[in-house]
Image (spheres, grey):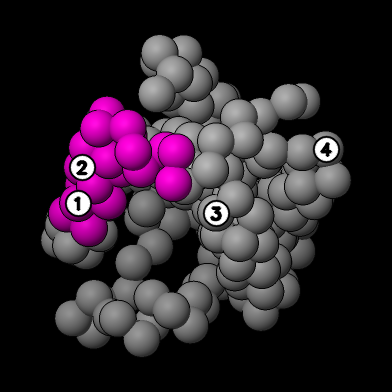
Amino acid sequence: MVREKLSWKEAWAKNSFRIQLLATILLIVLIISLMPHFFLFIQERTGRVLYDPLLQLLPPRNLSPLTFTMIYSAIIVAIISFSFYPQVLLRALQSYCLLTVARVVCNWLVPLNDPPGLILLTDPFVDAIGYGGKIITKDLFFSGHTSTMFLLFLAAPNRPLKIFFLFITIGVATCLLIQHVHYTVDVVVAPVFAWFFYKICFSVKKI
């Protein structure tokens, strides 16, 4: 797939690009600052426990180290590779903003309790930030990790990167289910949401 090869100098010279990029970065900072408060809110709620035949077939195992090795490796690769494509990077960031807002709405509308057999997912980065001593387990519908990895697959500017991010998406989704961190539906619908919001951003007139 051919992607725009606009240089940073060319992109930054466009007023619309500068405004969109700076506004998107500010929005991401705002979202990150507010998300812990929302997580604490949903953690206090009582939700439903879904019947999940697939999870019943999977003995829970702690795969946190493998899961976050894949996730952070993918993020590092994405930052480096997308940095050569300013417009691709901008669309990926904009899609991530929409995706995160959608997750907030979905989690608010669909209160769920922990899947049976859940083993706490240990994220070294999130643990360093902390949520006031609270453990967050009800950020369920839909899977943020799976949707974000699939978003990287969609935004990837060449075939080798797409293959890499697709394998990462499948690996992360599988680990989350084996660890019973999410219900199957949380993981299955995550790529659909990622595709939808990426297509919205991609359909916007080119900068």
Give the Cα separation between the discs numbered 3 and 2: 18 Å
Tell which circle, 3 or 1, labels the residue nearer the N-terminal end.
Answer: 1
Residue at image coords 40%, 13%: 205
Tag nearer the camera, 3 or 1 = 3
Under circle 2, the secondary element is helix
Instruction: Choose between 115 and 142: the one closer to the eye.
Output: 142
Under circle 3, the secondary element is loop
Q: Which residue is mark 2?
A: 23
Tell which circle, 3 or 4, labels the residue nearer the N-terminal end.
Answer: 3
x and y percentages locating residue 10 in the rendered image: 44, 38
Tell which circle, 3 or 2, labels the residue nearer the N-terminal end.
Answer: 2
Q: Which residue is mark 4?
A: 159
Under circle 4, the secondary element is helix
Q: Is residue 78 magenta?
A: no
Give the Cα separation between the discs numbered 2 and 1: 5 Å
Under circle 1, the secondary element is helix
Give the Cα separation between the discs numbered 3 and 1: 18 Å
Which residues are drawn in magenta? Answer: 9-30
Q: Which residue is mark 1?
A: 26
Tell which circle, 4 or 1, labels the residue nearer the N-terminal end.
Answer: 1
Say what amino acid the circle numbered 4 marks. Answer: Arg
Q: Is residue 3 visible?
A: yes
Q: Which residue is mark 3?
A: 83
